[in-house]
Image (cartoon, rainbow, N blue to C red):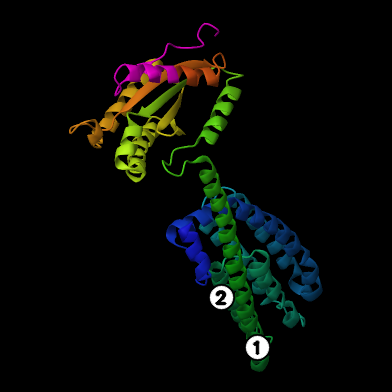
């Protein structure tokens, strides 16, 4: 988000982003760009061949050569390029291929024009202007690619009209000025088109990122950074709904920080919050490694949901959680000089939908109370639920 905000503030004047953002931009726009260039390529090929009418009217003496070039050389090349484009995975490669195809399309009719004796050659060569407009305004090639293509097309235009020799020096220079000015104006348009496109992408990306942030905020407990009870309800509802078509083994691991009220009363809520954050961070880390979901269940209680594992795996994770919290070595002097913050763990595993979510959490809660009755800093595991019904 910070990178996006910085790019928006900068105005994208350089038509480029930071490397990571640039890679994302190219990846996000690759498919849309391919579809756009494919559709414009097909339409462009049709219109390109309709210019056979202009060829017939202006260059009748070499019309056969122009027709062969358009229909048997350039058109098959365009078809091949359109097929090749479907296989390209890089947007850069896609833009290069599109630019090259446009330049080659402009080369053939002007080269043929050199050998014509038609008095209409002066007007015929103005067709290059349409190809320049197509390159910048229709294909909307990125500025750098458009600049390379336009420079090539301008060079082709100036060289072929000079070789053809149907203009006197004054007319040729005036014609060259016309094309040079056109290139400058079209490149200005290309620059502003790409700048607007990039800014639009940034605003859209910022909107998506804000949506993700709001979603995260809505389902995350702000203190512990664990998922909240609301998201827990959504997740469990989804699990039990999916289990309606295929039974699913679900494990609930309920965790309570031992003597946390005494800790809060002795050291204050700020220190209590700090303790809660450290314990939660440890639970979150181990849960992520196990591909389990951690939630703040309430107060100093946390819940870990784990899908598709057996009782032994659940017990091992519960033991790892107890050990990891103890290894934090957070002092709890209210319990004694050497006392440390510990947790108690209750585990229950059941087969959804044969055991309800409410009963599964209740079984884990009973196991947690059993761990507390056993002296805390330990875990207890409830019997497997749902197997008989299954």
Spot occupied by residue 230 in the image (x, y as percentages of width and height): 55, 35
Q: Mark 1: few, some, or many residues within 10 Å (few <14, many ≥20)?
A: some
**In front of the other: 305 or 148:** 305
On the rendered structure, is 255 left or right of 36?
left
At horizontal 68% and vertical 88% (from top left) the residue drawn is: 167
Seen in the picture, residue 197 relative to 184 is either above or below; the reply is: above
Q: CA distance from mark 1 to mark 2?
A: 18 Å
The answer to which quarter of the image holds residue 260 is: top left
Q: Mark 2: few, some, or many residues within 10 Å (few <14, many ≥20)?
A: some
* Discs 1/2, front: 2
In the picture as drawn, the residue positioned furthest to the bottom comes out as: 170
**In front of the other: 318 or 125:** 318
Seen in the picture, residue 189 relative to 275 is either above or below; the reply is: below
Helix, strand or loop under label 2: helix
Residue 186 among magenta residues: no
Instruction: List the residue tagged with mark 1.
Output: 172
The answer to which quarter of the image holds residue 190 is: bottom right
At horizontal 52% and vertical 52% (from top left) the residue drawn is: 27
Helix, strand or loop under label 1: helix
Seen in the picture, residue 299 relative to 319 is either above or below; the reply is: below
Spot occupied by residue 355 in the image (x, y as percentages of width and height): 54, 15
At horizontal 73% and vertical 82% (from top left) the residue drawn is: 122
**In front of the other: 265 or 337:** 265
Instruction: List the residue tagged with mark 2.
Output: 151
Spot occupied by residue 248 in the image (x, y as percentages of width and height): 52, 19
At horizontal 66% and vertical 90% (from top left) the residue drawn is: 174
Q: Give the residues in magenta.
A: 365-390
Residue 376 among magenta residues: yes
Q: Quadrant of the C terminus?
A: top right
Seen in the picture, residue 15 relative to 320 is either above or below; the reply is: below
């Amino acid at each position: 988000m910070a990178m996006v905000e910085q790019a928006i503030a900068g105005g994208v004047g350089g038509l480029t982003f930071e490397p990571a953002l640039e890679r994302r931009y190219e990846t996000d726009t690759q498919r849309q760009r391919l579809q756009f260039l494919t559709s414009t390529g097909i339409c462009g090929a049709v219109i390109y061949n309709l210019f056979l009418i202009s060829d017939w009217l202006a260059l009748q003496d070499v019309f056969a050569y122009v027709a062969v070039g358009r229909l048997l050389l350039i058109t098959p090349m365009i078809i091949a390029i359109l097929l090749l484009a479907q296989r390209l995975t890089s947007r850069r490669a896609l833009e290069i291929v599109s630019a090259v195809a446009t330049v080659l399309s402009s080369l053939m009719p002007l080269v043929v024009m050199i050998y014509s004796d038609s008095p209409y050659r002066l007007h015929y060569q103005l067709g290059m202007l349409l190809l320049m407009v197509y390159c910048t305004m229709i294909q909307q090639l990125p500025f750098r690619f458009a600049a390379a293509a336009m420079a090539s097309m301008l060079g082709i235009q100036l060289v072929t009209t000079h070789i053809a020799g149907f203009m006197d020096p004054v007319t040729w220079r005036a014609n060259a000025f016309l094309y040079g000015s056109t290139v400058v104006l079209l490149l200005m348009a290309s620059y502003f088109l790409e700048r607007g496109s990039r800014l639009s992408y940034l605003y859209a990306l910022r909107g998506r990122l804000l949506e993700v942030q709001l979603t995260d905020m809505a389902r995350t407990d702000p203190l512990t950074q664990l998922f909240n009870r609301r998201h827990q309800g959504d997740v469990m509802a989804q699990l039990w709904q999916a289990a309606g078509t295929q039974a699913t083994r679900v494990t609930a691991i309920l965790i309570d920080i031992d003597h946390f009220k005494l800790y809060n009363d002795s050291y204050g809520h700020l220190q209590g919050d700090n303790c809660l954050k450290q314990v939660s961070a440890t639970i979150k880390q181990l849960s992520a490694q196990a591909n389990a979901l951690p939630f703040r269940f309430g107060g100093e209680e946390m819940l870990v949901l784990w899908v598709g594992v057996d009782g032994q795996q659940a017990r091992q994770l519960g033991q790892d959680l107890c050990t990891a919290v103890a290894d934090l070595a957070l002092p709890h002097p209210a319990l004694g000089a050497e006392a440390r913050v510990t947790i108690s763990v209750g585990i229950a595993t059941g087969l959804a939908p044969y055991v309800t979510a409410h009963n599964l959490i209740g079984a884990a809660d009973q196991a947690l109370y059993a761990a507390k009755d056993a002296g805390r800093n330990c875990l207890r595991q409830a019997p497997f639920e749902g197997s008989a019904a299954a």
